[in-house]
Image: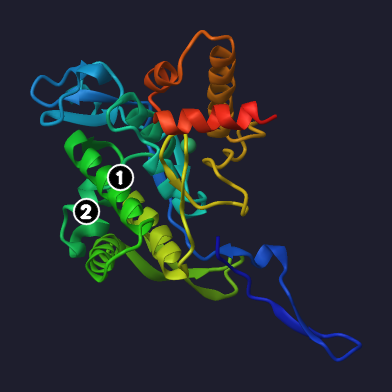
Amino acid sequence: MKRIKPGKTETDYNEHKKTIHPEEWEVDYLQTWLSVYGPYAFFDTSTGLRIPPQAATIATTVIASAGDNLFELQRKRVSTKRYNPFAVRALFEKMDKIQLDNLSSILIFCNEYGLLGEEIMKRPSSLRGVYSGVYGKIESLDFFIREVQELKNCLKIYNCSRSPDQNFKLMITVNKYLATVSPRVQLLPDGSKLLPGQTSATLLGAVYYQLYELFGSGAELKECPLCGSYFTPRTHRSNFCPTPEGEGYTRSPCENRYNQMVHWSREKYMLGKKTVEEIAAMKKRPATEVQQWLDGYERR
Ligand SMILES: [Zn+2]
């Protein structure tokens, strides 16, 4: 995360200049405060009733702050969390991990990071500031799914050897979302200094700002062998989705689950209880991959 650290320059006894950054002078360069109105649930817009995730059909469903009836929620909504999305490392990874065929995973994402910003994306730019009060409370499921799919496509294209046409498409897509990101002047907490910064009216803007930095840096993405999500490797040896930060994890949950799957398969195979084909079918992995796990095992 980029931070503005306006420092004082001092010259030490060796005549070396060094810049000192007092901690109280540190301000996030990228700053936006988004509200989460969780817990969210799915509602049918025609009846106003809550529907379980497995029954949610896209066309008439909205994601909104949970309660019994959509129409009664209007006055009750209070934000449960406010956070700076720019300060969340690699937000696009979290969004890419949403399983669109399992709508519960949409609610889990929304309860953590809020809604994407349909209300603002649909308004003309001159009205974005005026209407931003609606943001975060209600969003159509159709919009949410389309946006997540678009992001997934972007990451997939980025991770391939791209044609000029594909690069062009990425450029257009990212720029579309950057329209909700704008420069602004901000103040040091003590009000003594003006600093440059960026803000985003939507979560999507913040997500694509991170893609803008990623694409601009040319950094590589990896694809997790377990869940298929894309991520920026934290070290050169990272092969699985990164270990979640600050949640008491010491290892990547995807790496753990993958290792358990390999271990289980080797055991079943060695005991003669399952064939390669049976394991491949049960674990929904290609038989060639299963064979690799066993080859590695037999050599030991
Ligand atoms: Zn993964």
**Percent of width and height locating residue 184:** 41, 70
| Image: 117 above or below 300 | below
Which of the two discs, 1 and 2, labels the residue nearer the N terminus?
1
In the rendered structure, which amino acid carries the disc numbered 1? Leu
User: Which residue is rendered at x = 23% and y = 64% of the image?
Assistant: 169
Secondary structure of the residue carrying tag 2 is: helix
Q: Nearer the viewer, residue 98 or 257?
A: 257
Residue 154 as seen in the image, left or right of residue 58? right
User: Which residue is rendered at x = 28% and y = 59% of the image?
Assistant: 177
Secondary structure of the residue carrying tag 1 is: loop
Question: Residue 259, located in which quarter of the rendered image?
Answer: top right
**Residue 189 makes an appearance in the image:** no
Q: Which residue is mark 1?
A: 116
| Image: 163 above or below 121 | below
In the rendered structure, which amino acid carries the disc numbered 2? Met
For the C terminus, the image quarter is top right
The residue sitting at the front extreme is: 299
Residue 150 as seen in the image, left or right of residue 1? left
User: Which residue is rendered at x = 86% and y = 91% of the image?
Assistant: 15
Asked if the residue at label 2 sits under 8 Å from ligand 1, the reply is no
The residue sitting at the bottom extreme is: 15
For the N terminus, the image quarter is bottom right
Q: Nearer the viewer, residue 169 or 190?
A: 169
Question: Residue 188, located in which quarter of the rendered image?
Answer: bottom right
Q: Which residue is mark 2?
A: 121
**Percent of width and height locating residue 250:** 67, 34
Residue 112 as seen in the image, left or right of residue 136? right
**Percent of width and height locating residue 189:** 59, 63
**Percent of width and height locating residue 246:** 62, 38
Asked if the residues shown at circle 1 and circle 2 are in contact, with their CB atoms under 8 angstroms apart, the answer is: yes
User: Which residue is rendered at x = 15% and y = 21% of the image?
Assistant: 48
What's the distance in space between the residues labelled 1 and 2, CA to CA? 9 Å
